[in-house]
Image: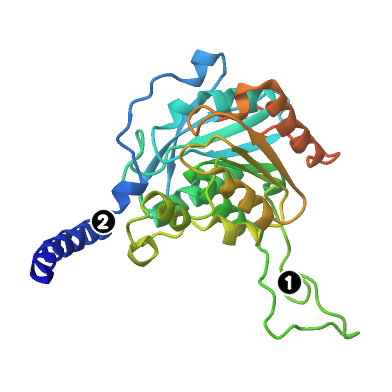
Amino acid sequence: MRRMLGELLIPLGIAYGVVLVLVFVFQSHLVFFPGTGREAVLTPQSYGMRFESVEIRTADGETLAAWWVPAEGALGTVLFFHGNAGNISHRLDFLQMFHRLRYSTLIVDYRGYGKSTGTPSEEGTYRDAEAAWDYVCQVRLALPQDIVIAGESLGGAVATWLAVKVSLIPSPSPEGRTGPDGSPLRKGEGSGARVVGPRAVILHSAFTSVNDLGSQVYWFLPVRFLSRFGYDNVGNLKRISAPVFIAHSRDDDIVPFAHGRKLYEAAREPKTFLEMSGGHNDGFIFTRPEWVAALAAFLDSHAGERRMEPPMDADGRR
């Protein structure tokens, strides 16, 4: 009996080991799906919106395809990062929603997606996000405090990383430094650092971390041991001081609802949670007026009394 059991377990163990090796080597194919539609199916013009097709160069030489959709009398600028499949032409409803809320939007395809050059990677998406931010600030002349960073699913992790990157929030000193009067220093004091943009962060159907989600989806694999990815939204949210809006569906069939709640718990005040319904690929904010109204109220409450000068288009027009 033992011999028969051994003869059965040995080949199973070898097969499992082969699976582990394959997952380790090709794990990026389990995270990124750039091939599910690289051609633009529609453009913002199909929805009656004026737009510009732009190309953005990254620091490492890739060229990103993006759309700039200006809004008349813009109240701010949204920098939008989409999920891990499809391209920017599959997110027109998001663009229309922000346009109706009077926010200009830049939506960008990561490297390897749509008409963007290169091959997707975690570090690559971060470089793409930095390039998109620089474009909005330097070419469209948007002020950091007028920019809302938004991310859908995987894009949520890119959004939170960028928000940390541009916020310039110094980490607390491990020595617990104090001021001249002996009181603890607050963040930024005594270091010359100051908090700048973004105005807010919006997360739609985002996960706590790619490893948390992977461990649930591939429960039969030692995901945390094999993974070369981070995408840690929880860790990033703890370092973001900007207002955070988290929207998640209780019926999400890809990223469980619990992820959204944990993200909300990790986020600092001020923060808002919107519970939606519908699956991961059909439970969107723009599908119900009351959900759009909740987002509009959040944006209005954190816009302040000052209204920005509308960002310029390529011809220098407001």
Q: Residue at 68% across / 64% down in the picture?
A: 169
Q: Residues within 10 Å of mark 2 (few under 14, many from 20)?
A: some
Residue 96, position as x, y percentages in the image: 59, 22
Residue 188, position as x, y percentages in the image: 75, 69
Q: Along the line of sight, which residue is nearer the eye, 70 or 27?
A: 27
Say what amino acid the circle numbered 2 marks: Val
Q: Along the line of sight, which residue is nearer the eye, 127 or 5?
A: 5
Quadrant where the C terminus lies?
top right
Q: Residues within 10 Å of mark 1 (few under 14, many from 20)?
A: few
**Nearest to N terminus: mark 2 or mark 1:** 2
Give the residue number, with chain letter if any, for mark 1.
Answer: 192
Q: Residue at 31% across / 51% down in the picture?
A: 28
Callout 2 touching callout 1 (CB < 8 Å)? no
Helix, strand or loop at mark 2: helix
Quadrant in the rendering for residue 117: top left
Foreground disc of the pair 2, 1: 2
Give the residue number, with chain letter if any, for mark 2.
Answer: 23
Quadrant where the N terminus lies?
bottom left
301 left or right, relative to 147: right
Residue 52, position as x, y percentages in the image: 50, 26
